[in-house]
Image (cartoon, rainbow, N blue to C red):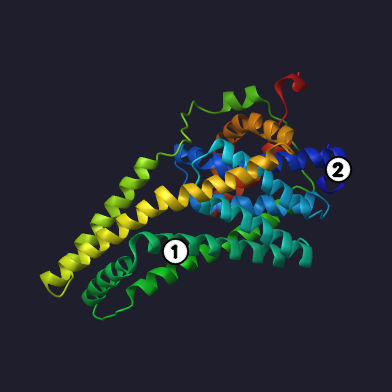
Amino acid sequence: MKIAYKNIDAEQRVVAIHRLTALWAFTESGLGGVMHALQIPFTGLLVGGMAVIMISMIAEISEHNFKQVLKSALIVLIVKAMVSPHTPPPAYIAVGFQALLGYGLFSLMRVNFISILLLSTIAMLESAIQKLLVLTLFFGESLWKAADAMINLLSEQLGFTTSTGSYWIIAVYLFIYLAGGFFIAWLALKTIHSFYAKNPKFISDEDAKLSITEIKITTKKNKLKKLWVLIGFMIMLSVILFLFASDRTEGWLAVVKTISWTLSAILIWYIIIGPLLTKAIQQFLKKKQSKYGEEVVQILSFIPVLRLLTSLAWQQSKLNTGLGRWSTFVTTLIHFTLTYTEPSTTR
């Protein structure tokens, strides 16, 4: 029997929106850990892309009740704060930005390819620009000077010179995210259309466990590891700036400037600004938690199931390659999320 998701009743819509909200919350708080365990590439683009697809599907399945997008986003942020309490403020800002942007675009243009494309490309560019701003905050202009020096060396070996190598790096980086935005928009529209008529194959918890190998997943973020990455990157920049300086005095000054700037930025962010912003955001979300307490509890209890379904969906997508595997993985994961049923209801 085929199910036309466009014609499901009100109760089924509530369940579908709840499942999609749970998948969105899992994407933000736990999917990254699962993807690293499964060695899935381009984690950042997929996590951001899944958010765009969830926003688009929630807007569509809710019969264009676009305020549901904002409600779901608030629940996602509450779950994110509970599951990953050390999440930095930019992650909360990204989710809020995507939800508000989706609400605004869909309210003006309804859910169609143009509105989804605008949501996807703007969201991806915001994510890319945010990362560039964070890098500049931590490493200052030394980062781009080092990039210019490296690109200039490579260009000289190829027979031409350029003094703006950092601009090329930024342009290529933004282009990758922009191209990702187009692909995500196409995938979101394809996913919505594919669920208008589906033959659901209901799977239970036991089915999922039998279909995947045991995978140890760690979702806790190691703050010390992040600091070591920053320190290692700082040392690499210092070496480049020293080697490519016109003289040793200028080289040492560049190294001292890089070290002092980076250490100051790390201390100010991790000790003062970051904790204060995170605490303010979590206090706001805590006030909203009582209003959505039951839904939050249900989503938290469903997250372990989503870990299993993610692994199962990735395994089932292995028959495809390249972008085809991404498409199959996303649509399969969403389909499993919507059609999953508890073991007791399948016997």
- In this rendering, would 167 be left or right of 255? right
- In this rendering, would 170 be left or right of 162? right
Tell me, yes or no, if residue 172 can be seen here. yes
Residue, disc 1: 133
Closer-to-camera residue (28/82):
82
Residue 223: x percent and y percent? 39, 42
Tell me, yes or no, if residue 26 can be seen here. no
- Name which residue lies at 29% across and 79% down: 163
The local secondary structure at tag 1 comes to helix
**Earlier along the polypeptide chain: callout 2 or callout 1?**
2
Residue, disc 2: 8
Q: Is residue 249 above or below residue 306?
A: below
- Residue 2 appears in which quarter of the rendering? top right
Identify residue type, mark 1: Leu
The local secondary structure at tag 2 comes to loop
Closer-to-camera residue (54/133):
133
- Name which residue lies at 61% across and 27% down: 208
Residue 95: x percent and y percent? 60, 53
Residue 317: x percent and y percent? 57, 42
Residue count near mark 1 (Cα–Cα under 10 Å), binned few <14, some 14–19, many ≥20:
few
- Residue 136 appears in which quarter of the rendering? bottom left
Residue count near mark 2 (Cα–Cα under 10 Å), binned few <14, some 14–19, many ≥20:
some
- Name which residue lies at 65% across and 29% down: 301
Identify residue type, mark 2: Ile
- In this rendering, would 300 be left or right of 107? left
User: How far, Cα to Cα, is label 2 from label 1?
Assistant: 44 Å
Quarter placement of the C terminus = top right
